[in-house]
Image: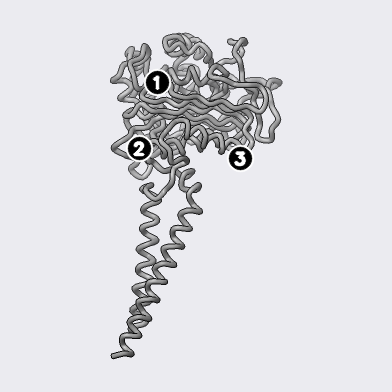
Amino acid sequence: MRTFKYIGLVVLAIIIWTAFIGYGTMDGFLLRSITSEDTSEAFIEAAQEKIEEDFVGNFAMMLIEDGEVAKTHFYSVDQPVNENTVFPVASISKWVTSFGIMKLVEQGKLDLDKPVDDYLTRWQLPESDFDNNKVTIRKLLSHSSGLVDDLGYNGFEPNEKVQTIEESLTKASDTDYSDGVAIVGYEPGSQYMYSGAGYTILQLLIEEITDLSFQEYMTKVVFQPLQMNNSTFVISEKPNLKLAPIYKNDGTTRPMNTFTALAAASLFTTTADLSKFVQASVSSNPVLRAETIATMIEPETFINEMGVYGLGPHLYSQNATDSKVIGHDGSGNDAINTAARIDLMSKDGIIILETGSYDIASSLADEWLFWKAGIADYVVIQRNKTFLFLLLGIGVIVIIGISIFIFKRNNRKRRLV
């Protein structure tokens, strides 16, 4: 009977230790950062080691400290890149687009909570099983509109015909993993579901409200005021830009695709230009008022009561109280990956633009998030997996060893008695 009691206590101790490891993993205090040193130089050195592990065609990284550019790092297998080299940034386009939309809100030309169909004449949401009048600009910005397109646009190769906005919204032909149809498939406002088509609708909305092309409007109200002189949504309109070679993950290069979905996927920019945009969220800027920025960074959509998206930016702080990190990532198109983050409290940030890898920019941005703010994501947990299993195993061995020692000692005492 006493033996079973000991076994039960050992099992309980192992369960408690396992729970401790799990809690320490989720909370982050058991995880090790990519570097133990608290300097930009150390983070860059650790990042370079990651770059050397897998193929990366070209890479541009900028670290921001206290609202100012602190360090840069560049890498390429062929043609050198620098802070003025232009990269396609994929879905970071959405965050930049949100500035253009919110400018119209500031000017009283748009109402965040008015049905988007009330503004559109060239195209309207198709009939659905839900109330399309609940699809508002607020919900489109925050990916809670009910749209189920699941669109990540591939764009069109140089020999392909580019769709019009209306054709793309009716059925996008530049996607290979969804139907490409912009239709409301769940109750608007009920949940978060990422939608590329939502931002294409916002692109159309801008053109209808302003009587300008999307490119003209965004250049006028965002790029020029922020002096983002090497940025464009239509690369053919700025042919003299220094474009980074577009590497695929097999090491070959390809020409850049052309997009109908400019607002969702077609921004071309540099680390220098993007730093001006990112800094606009933490300092006064000529585009949006501080109260507008404050509105944009409030959680609008949630997953398990955790705010994940505002009116344009993704929210990364996971309800932490000592940081408020916003930003956006971009990926796809074999193989582009980009990431931008800024902590509104510390004013520290990171920008990574690269081609040739599907995930290194996002992975390193997640590593930066843990390094700077202690917020652990999947990438950090996976990197620490071996260490955590080792820690778990050592703990189990120690528990069993101590238990055997105590059991034998008590048995000896009983025999002596």
Mark 3 is on which residue type?
Glu
**Which residue is under mark 2?**
307
Q: Is residue 79 left or right of residue 315?
A: right
Closer to us: mark 2 or mark 1?
A: 1
Mark 2 is on which residue type?
Gly
Q: Is residue 351 above or below residue 7?
A: above
Q: Position of residue 290 (x, y in %)?
A: 30, 19
The picture quadrant where one finds residue 279 is top left
Question: Is the residue marked by circle 3 packed among few (<14), some (14-19), or many (20+) residues within 10 Å?
Answer: few
Question: Is the residue marked by circle 2 packed among few (<14), some (14-19), or many (20+) residues within 10 Å?
Answer: some
Q: Is residue 45 above or below residue 398?
A: above
Color encoding of the figure: one colour
Task: Tell which circle, 2 or 1, labels the residue nearer the N-terminal end.
Answer: 1
Q: Can residue 133 be seen at all in this image of the molecule?
A: no
Mark 1 is on which residue type?
Glu
Callout 1 secondary element: strand
**Which residue is under mark 1?**
68
Residue positioned 36% across, 82% down in the render: 3
The picture quadrant where one finds residue 131 is top left
The picture quadrant where one finds residue 293 is top left
Residue positioned 53% across, 20% down in the render: 267
Q: Can residue 417 be seen at all in this image of the molecule?
A: yes
Question: Is the residue marked by circle 1 packed among few (<14), some (14-19), or many (20+) residues within 10 Å?
Answer: some
Q: Position of residue 354 (x, y in %)?
A: 57, 28
Task: Tell which circle, 3 or 2, labels the residue nearer the N-terminal end.
Answer: 3
Q: Position of residue 251 (x, y in %)?
A: 69, 32
**Which residue is under mark 3?**
53
